Image (cartoon, rainbow, N blue to C red):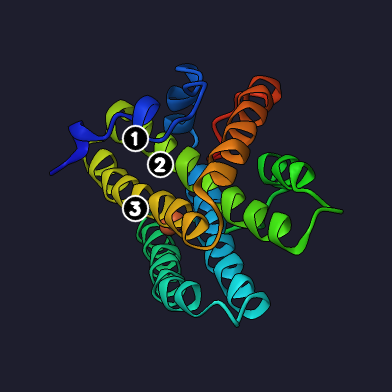
Amino acid sequence: MATDSIDVKNILGLKLPSDPRWVDLAGMELEDILTDHAYCEQKAATTCISLIQRYSDKEEMVAALSPIVTEEWGHFRIVLAELKKRKLQLGKQRKDEYVNKLLEFQKKDGSVEDRFLDRLLTMALIEARSCERFKRLSEGLNDAYMRNFYRKFMESEAGHYTLFINLSELYLPKEKVRKRWNEWLKYEKELMKTIEVRGDRIH
Ligand SMILES: [Fe+2]
Ligand SMILES: [Fe+2]
């Protein structure tokens, strides 16, 4: 398994590692974390579907995202099955402060190209941070079964992060993608500092 080769800080480019207290809190609130996780997977699938609808003329992107929809929905079903196995409830979707704050950073009045890039980079960032969080869970939870459970998600999300960056570079100049990606990373670093550390949230 390639888990040890994934260096979250260097490969994913994130500028701030998660607060180490988070994984301990998450371990204590497994039902909530599974519920939140399920909805993260649902939103990933839904967002890929809307990208396909909005940019249906971008053939390579449509082809690349179609299987991701299936994969993310598969993740949702895995988490749902885990909840059921533990006789836990899916529960209600919570307000997603992290994602909402990221959406605020998207250029609302930019060119069509700028908005497209921001949509892809938002996804890349959510995948990167989710991957980092799953890595923490896969290393820090007391339960060996759950550590393994999260290791598999970590590997998938690392692949998705790369895909969204690659798609950005397929349609837009590399220089432009790099520049904007760095702006996103800086914004996310500051955002992570302001978000309360709580164990019932993936982000
Ligand atoms: Fe996923
Ligand atoms: Fe993903």
Tell me whether circle 3 and circle 1 mark residues in contact (CB < 8 Å): no
- Say which residue appears at 29% left-offset and 29% top-offset: 7
- Image x and y of residue 101, in percent: 74, 40
The numbered disc on residue 172 is none
SS at badge 2: helix
Q: What residue is disc 2 on?
A: 131
Q: Earlier in the sequence, mark 3 or mark 1?
A: 1
Q: Is mark 1 within 8 Å of ligand 1?
A: no
Q: Nearer the viewer, residue 155 or 40?
A: 155
User: Could you tell me the amino acid type at mark 1?
Assistant: Lys
Q: Position of residue 162 (x, y in %)?
A: 39, 50
Cα–Cα span, label 2 and label 1: 6 Å
> Gap between marks 3 and 2, in whole Å?
9 Å
The answer to whether residue 142 is visible is no
Q: Is residue 99 left or right of residue 27?
A: right
Residue 114 drawn above or below residue 67: above
- Asked if the residue under mark 1 is in contact with the one under mark 2, i.e. CB atoms within 8 Å, the reply is yes
Marks 3 and 1, Cα distance to the nearest angstrom? 14 Å
Q: Nearer the viewer, mark 3 or mark 2?
A: 3
Identify the secondary structure beneath mark 3: helix
The structure residue drawn at horizontal position 51% and vertical position 19%, both measured from the top left corner, is 19
Question: Disc 3 residue type?
Answer: Gly
Quick one: which residue is furthest to the right in this view?
Answer: 109
Q: Secondary structure at mark 1?
A: helix
The answer to whether residue 174 of the structure is visible from this angle is yes
Label whose residue precedes the other's in the sequence (3 or 2): 2
Which image quarter: residue 156?
bottom left
In the rendered image, which residue does mark 1 sit on? 135
Residue highlighted by disc 3:
159
- Dot 2 amino acid type: Cys
